[in-house]
Each structure stands twice: as structure tokens, then as C-alpha cells.
Image (tube, rainbow, N blue to C red):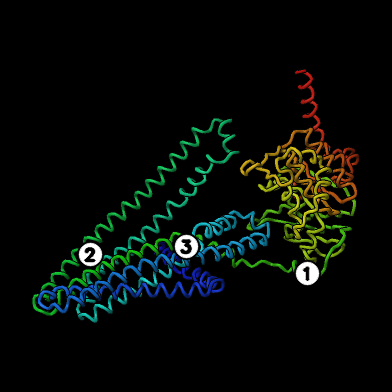
Amino acid sequence: MEETSDFKNAFFLFIKSQIYFLKLIIKEHPKLFYLFSLLTLFISLLPPFIIYLNKELIDSVSIVGNNPNMLKISIILLSVFFLLNYLDSVINLVNEYIFSKISYTVNYVLKSLLIDKFIAIPLKEYEDSSFYDTIGLSNSAIDGNGVKIVQEFISIIGSLISAIGIFGTLLAIHWSLPIALFLSSLPGITFLVMAKQKGFDMQKEVSPDERELGFTDGLFINKNVLKEIKLFDSSKFLINKWSYLFKKVRNKKMSIQKWELKTQSFAALVLQISSLGVSIFLVFQIYRGNLSIGSYVALLTAVTTIQGIFGSIGGSLGNVFETAIYNNALLKILNYKVDNTNDKNEKKIEDIQTICLENATFSYPNTNINVLENVNLTITKGDKLSIVGANGSGKTTLVNCILGLYELTSGKIKVNGVDIEQININNYYKNISAIFLDFTRYKYSLRENINFNNKTNEVDDNKLIESLKKVSLDEKIPTLKEELNTYLTKEMPNGSELSGGEWQRVALARAVYKHTDFIVLDEPTAALDPITELEIFNMFHNISKDKTSITISHRIGPTKLSDRIIVLDKGKVVEDGSFDHLMNIKGLYYEMYKAQSKWYDSEKKNVMAVT
């Protein structure tokens, strides 16, 4: 019962998504859509005419020997018959072209809407794994089929029109023909629907394995993964895993095909037996003079055509059910209600004087665990803060809340005494810069990697080069084949690869180019060696001299550059003060500093022993 319910839900979901897509298509390409629909209607009406013409042609040819005048009529009917078949082929090709044009435009609009929604959705939602899966599926809905499935829906309608027309044509020939056609087709259609429902349920079972196979297959063409494969000698493991998944998916697919083969073979047998019985009945009708030979041939043609029509409908329904999960995700994301009141707030901040957190508490969606709990903190213009703590203590979450990227579960954040929820959030973003742990390495040019913050897209090269100078990257420009226009990836012509330290400098240059008075450095140096890391911290210290700055680091040493250090433990501020103060009270910071000092001392002794 549950499987049947899933099958029905998928169908109704499809209808809902098509209504949305149809409205969008009509909005973007009304004339082309109506032309496409008219042409589809036209070719849907052709099968009944062709069957009727075939009947008249057979009847006229069968008596042409006895009536020479029928020769001319036979030739005319034959010409019209082939003309209609030609029109059917040409119009189908034209329709494919028309809908391709519609699809490109509408998919572009859908993708644009989806991208806008991805950006507008609160970042905390991305921490919910089920919601993140929905986002991935919604993206695949457009990449995989988009509005192409609308064509399937219209094809189903056209096929039904053809079927109704065929029944009507046969009724005009003889009252018994539609009944005979229905009786001969009913068993096959019944088994077809059963096969599609079973196929849908079996396809659901294989889908997770297909996704894992796709992920594994993609590892072998990923440059970064290939490095690990070579170094860790994991090729045998991964190849065996790929082979296992491939065979597992293949066996399940073959099982589906085997089941469909048995079902469809049985359906074909039932269809042929029922058709044989109907044909024998019609032969007796011809023998008694109740039917012409042309009528008999028309019925046989109609049976074949109806089989093809319902086969086409079944195939279209199969595609619909297979893509239902993606369409559901797409509609869920597009219909996601974003609270954009902060975008419309009129209160703006031109200069951040203070940021005050009052009992700030935060927990991620669908969890009861507070990542931050009753944090009280005041940041004054010009402060140089470092936030330290163990992994999972809430450092990055705290910064994301201060930056306005996460909304508090409870408590308040006030900027210049104004609740952040009353401030125009886009205006607030203009006043802050940040270099994150997982900062993005865009596979674009050096210029585009730094200047994308400029909405006017007018690049001031002097300002850009000055930004690169401040992070000691200006000397790199002459070594690049296309200088500032060089793509920072070997995947593009004349592209160049940067080292980890050079990418850190690019990230810093972005912040310098944006030129704000509030800047955050969130552990982006975690993968660097200590010397390069210290260089980056010194650069950050220099470029933030006259700014308010927050630094997050897993290394304690560089925090001595800050005026004030905040120590987090399990989401709570447990210590707050200068380096000297925290060392004197000998609390958590003192223990962390002492532990890392021992590590550095040990490392220094090992180096001296080697030398």
C-alpha cells in the first residue's frame, strides 16, 4: 500500500511542478509555446487521418482491377498518405528545435532564480544535512531535465488525443471496431501500468547506489584526489570499491530489465492472443460482408498505433516518476520563504563604532545544543581581538554571528547601539571584510579574484596593484603569462597555479581592495607552515593597523599581536583580557599557550639535533 502511495504522490507532484513550469514557459516564450502546442495538436490528429486514409486506400486498391476509375483515386490517396507521414516527421523535428529554444531560456531563468535563492537562504540552513541534500537535488533538477519534462507532459496529452481520435475514426468505420480495439489493448495497457509502477519502486532502491557510484567515478578525474591516490596507494581500494558498486548497480539494473522483460513478454503474449481472437471475429465479419478488407487493415494498424501510443505514454510516465524527487526539491527551494526584512530596513551604518553582544545564544537548525550560550561581549572601534579555544568551542560560529551571517537563537547583537535586525544587512556587509578558513579559490583571473566585490565592475588597476603590494604579491604579476588577466588554474589556457601561501595573499588582497574599517581573519592559515603563517599574520596586522580586527587562530603564539584575547570554551566566554593578564591568571589560555610552547620547544630541539 505504501509503495502505491509513493507512486501516486510522485504523479501528483509532477502535475504540481508542471503547473509552475508551464506558467514560467508562457511568461518567457508565449508565442513559441503556443506554436509548439498547436503543432503538437496537429501531429496528434494525424494518426486517425492516416488510419482512415489507409482504410480507404486498401479498399480502393482492392477494387481497382474491376473499376479502372479507382486508379486515380488510389494514387491521390497514396500521395496524401505519404505527405501526411512526411509532415509528421518534419513537424516533430521542428517541435524539437522549438522546445530546445524554450528550454534554454527557461532553464536559464530557473537557474537564476535558484542561485538567487541559494544566496538568500540563511547560512545556518546549510548546516542541516537534509536541507543541504534538498539543495543538491534542486540543482540537479535543472541540470538533469529542467523544463524538458514539460515536453513529456505535452507528449502524453498529444498521445491521448491521438488515441481518442483513433477510437473515433474506427467508430465512424464500424461500431464494433472501437470495442475490438479496446478489448485487444486493455490487457497490454494494464500490464504496462503495473510494470511502470514496479519499475519506479525498483529504481528508488538503486538510486542511492547510483549516487555513490557517481561520486566514486568522479574521484579518478579529480587532480587533488589523484595526488592522494598515488601517495596513499589507495588505487586498489578505490578501484575495488568502484567495481563493487558498478556491479551492484548493474545487477540491480539488469534485475529491473529482467523483470520488465518477463512482464512485457507476458503482456505481449496476452495482447497477441486477445488480438488474434478479435482478428478471427473480424474475419468472420468480412466473410459475412459486414466489414471491408480496408476496415480490417485499419483495425490492425490502429492496434499497432495504440500499442505505440501507450508505450510512449508509459515511457514518459517513467521519466516523470524518475525525476519526481528532483522536481520536489526544486519547488521546495523555489518556494522557500526568505525573511528579507533586513534587506529593506532603512537604518544604515556608515562607520562601525561598537558591536555589542548581549546574552547571545545560537544553535543550529533541528538541534537542541547551544553552540554559543549567553555570550556578552563589546567590541569598540580600533580593537585588535583574538578569539581562541579548542575545536568546537564556537569560535567561527561567534564570528559568523558578529558578521550578520547567522541569526541568533536568542539574545541581541547591537551595532552602534542599534539592534542588527533593524539594520539594512547589505549596508552592514559593506562595512566589513573577512578572510575565512575555507576561503574560495575562484578559477578566474587574478583581477576577478580580487575585484568581484566591486558591483560596478569598474576595475581600478592602480588600486588593485596597490592591494597586491600590501600583501607582497605584486612581484608575481610579471611572471604570469597574461598578468592580471591570467586564470589562476592550469585548467584554462595560459593559466597558472598558486601556492597555498600565495592564495592566502590573494584572499588578503580581496579584503584590502574592499577597504573597510572592520576586518576578520578566521584561521585561513591552518594549512601553512609556521614561517609562512607568521608572515600572513604580520601582513594582516599591518593592513589592519587603523581598523577594528578579529583574528581566529589555532596557534596561540600570533595572538600576542592582539590588544585583547577572548577565550571560548563550550560556547561560553571564559576569559577576556590582554596577553599579560591572561598569562598572569593562569587559566585556560595559559594552559593552551604552555602546551603549544612545549611543542615549539620540542620542535626546536629536534631541528638542532639534526643540524
The answer to whether 363 appears left or right of 56 in the picture is right
From the top left corner, tell me how far across and down residue 366 is, in percent. Answer: 63, 58
Q: Which quadrant holds the N terminus?
A: bottom left
From the top left corner, tell me how far across and down residue 487 is, in percent. Answer: 68, 45
Give the class, few, some or many, for how many residues have Cα within 10 Å of label 1's Cα (few <14, many ≥20). Answer: some
Image: 37 above or below 558: below
Q: State how many labels appear.
A: 3
Q: Which residue is mark 1?
A: 345
Is disc 2 placed on a helix, strand or loop? Answer: helix
Using the numbered discs, state the Cα–Cα distance from disc 1 to disc 2 in whole angstroms. 68 Å
Image: 367 above or below 293: above
Image: 312 above or below 514: below
Q: Which mark is residue 225?
A: none
Q: Which residue is mark 2?
A: 271
- Pick whichever of labels 1 and 3 is earlier in the sequence: 3
| Residue drawn at (84%, 46%) of the image | 466
| Residue drawn at (81%, 55%) of the image | 432
Q: Which residue is mark 3?
A: 324
Of 602 and 336, the residue lying toward us: 336
Give the class, few, some or many, for how many residues have Cα within 10 Å of label 3's Cα (few <14, many ≥20). Answer: many
Is disc 3 placed on a helix, strand or loop? Answer: helix
- Pick whichever of labels 2 and 3 is earlier in the sequence: 2
| Residue drawn at (79%, 67%) of the image | 422
